[in-house]
Amino acid sequence: MRNGVAGTVAMMTLFSGQASEPMPSEIGEEVVGLFEQFRTPLLRYLMSLGLNAQDGEEVIQDVFLALFQHLKKGKRGDNLRGWIFRVAHNLALKQFRSANSRIVRASVPIDEVQSEIVSCAATPEEVLGQTQSQERIQAIIQALPELDKRCLYLRAEGLRYREIADALGVSLGSVANSLERAIGKLSRVRERAGV
Amino acid sequence: MMSEHIREGELLRAADGELSKDRTAQINEHLAACWICRTRLRDLEGAIGQFVHAHIGGFESRIPKIDGPRSLLRARIAEMEGAEKPSWWEAVRLPLQRWSIPLYSAITVIIIGVVSIPFIVHKAAPGITVAEVLSKAESGEQLGLREVKQPVTYQKVRIQVGGHVYDRSIYRDAKNARHVAKLDSIGDRMSEKEADRMLNPVERAFSEAKLDWEAPLSPSRLSGWRSALSLRADQVRSDRGITEIATATPDGPIAEAKVKFRNADFRAISETLRLRDDRVVEIAELDYKVLELNQLHADLFGAAPTPLFAVRTVGLEAAQANAGGLALELDVIGRLDRVDAFTGEQIAVERHRDVVHVQGVVDGKQRRDQIIAALGLAAKNPELQLDLVVPEGRPRRPTGSAHEAIEGIDEFQQAPADGSLRDFFAKKSPGGIEEEIQRFTDEVSLRSQSARANALALKQIAERFSPEDLRAMTPEQHRQWRGMLQSHAGAVLKETRLIQENLEPIFRANTEDKRSPGSNLKSDADLVYAAAKLSDLTISNDSAVWHSFAASTQASNVTLVCLPEFWESLLDAEILAEEISASTANGESRF
């Protein structure tokens, strides 16, 4: 009943033209809300795939415009986050195919990542130790099979296994195996480095 | 109780909450008893933690602020909704589908909806574009001015920013390019000076966006700002006699502008600007009048009336120039220049007797419409012939990269400057060398292209008028011409200095500063010659930048930007741009 009242109010608002600031429909507002929630993890994921920030932003705009159309058609699955990441992932791959040269130049974040995660308060010896272990970890990530890497990045953004499977179009078992492999390798690198 | 240790994968899935309740309970029971498995789990968690820190932290500083992209999305969705206005049935059906309300509520809603249909019909304005609204507004503004012989506009606006409210009265004599403004703060008891200081940042944003602080609701300036954006999303709404346009963009100091127009005469009555730093500026028109100059106090614009009036009103030569094609051509060039039509478009303006012919090729239909809208009333002048061609096939939107890679060529060699850049950035920031190099080369290339484009526009505008034309111009027209030159020379100067600043730490070669204390520009002819010379210099400078920073199939070991000749050329360009800019400052003659 509460929902019914909300629907009636929304409808009256729509008809009376009061919902003009700045989006005329509730679906539009919902999409903007989802954009606010997912834009940063999405952009991080797309950048970890090798897109630069500008291309990543363009992909995200397209994702949320597609989401708007999707919701307007009344389609609303129970795994919206998986849907969003899947569309972003597919659009990113499309972007890779169409603009290969530009992406290659933006796809070497390892050194930068390594330089930023070393603690400023560490002693020079600690910095060296941290740097070396981070280098090993980054090298391991880069050497992982593409699927393992993508599963790892998506899991880091908070996606559940089923959502990752949806986003990448693979089975739940593949996701579990990829994550097990990836985390296992990282863990062994840490162990060897004595971290 | 389980006696064997738990596999790594199961430990991970248990920690991730991906196992059944029963299995999770079994594993937890085992972990409570088994130190070895607890330690293995902690190791896994440690590896995850380290990865997450690296992953999140590595991107933190590279994620841009959300405001611009959010505004853009908001506007794009609104635009999409405007274009696909739902039928009344859809408007009813979708919320029903969403909330699955009981049938009786649905019936109530449908009845409300049907009764309200007439209101919806008036709400959206799907038949009119933002460019058309601005064009109509411009036309209306010009028509109002034509009713008076020597019009001076009086406008009182209320400005609301950062919790302060100001009233500003502006008298504007557009024909003689002069104005006088008075500012009053409301409620805060500020002096005019203090209020000015508060409003300075807003005024700067206006200036950077090429809007006019002295005509804050000017549709032609809004049109110019909008046309210059490389990426934008528009929407138009109409309701109860008011049409509102909104443009959102990730470019420039203004993130979003919403302007309301009165439908009766398409006059802009208020605007809300959201600046890039999230400050919101609201400007509403409280009063507007078009007055005769002679109705006003003689000292309104300063001391005694300038001699401009005498020349304008009684000078035979000037009157002829106004009546003929020269005035029209100057007007057309000014309007085209405001939408940057000379900095890259293939547009040519010619005049035969009194007929002005604008012809060229533009990027697309939308761009053509923008240019026509920018022409405003002039586009309707029977003595203006427009011949703008839109090539078939959709052109690619320009990308952020200054010089795009050429597809299909595999054997690129490193750019000649690549080694020096690597050495420099390796010392400066050992991490992210590739990205630093990319950012650096993109910035220098874009600035170099911008300097070249502005110098080209400068040359075109300078050379467009013959010495006879320049002599026949009224002082006001002459000032307008010089104003355009000044604007482009200023842009060349700014870009050239920034190129120097960027290149200096890495490639600087010793050159002698040959700047002479006085200006070498003594006449209009000198100015025209200097504009052509500046254009040549920026072309060769841009070529040197391109050949130094672009990977190419043509082998070259010479980094042109290291050579003293390049630095001399850059310095020459700076000196020339500075001289032109100074000699045309504020449109005043320094000759």
Image: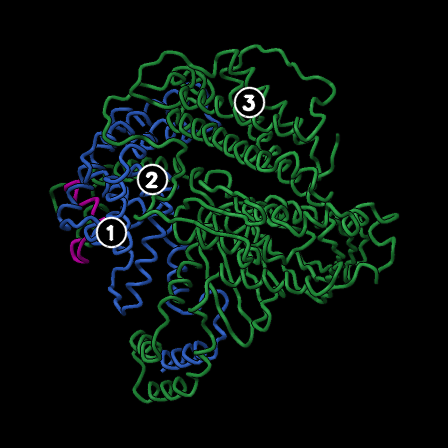
Chain colours: A blue, B green
Is residue B267 part of the magenta span, yes or no?
A: no
Which amino acid type is shown beneath numbered disc 2?
Answer: Met
Q: Position of residue B504 (x, y in %)?
A: 54, 18
Which labelled disc corresponds to residue B500?
3
In the image, B583: left or right of B28?
A: right
Label the magenta part by its dominant secondary structure. Answer: helix
Residue bearing mark 2 = A47
Q: Secondary structure at mark 1?
A: helix
Q: Position of residue B256 (x, y in %)?
A: 52, 55
The crowding category of the residue bearing disc 2, from other C-alpha atoms within 10 Å (few below 14, some 14 to 19, many at least 20), is many
Which amino acid type is shown beneath numbered disc 3?
Answer: Gln
Which amino acid type is shown beneath numbered disc 1?
Answer: Arg
Is residue B9 part of the magenta span, yes or no?
A: yes
Q: Looking at the image, is mark 1 or mark 2 earlier in the sequence?
A: 2
Residue at 37%, 61% in the rendered image: A31
Same subunit, tags 3 and 1: no
Residue bearing mark 1 = A86
Inter-mark Cα distance, 1 to 2: 15 Å
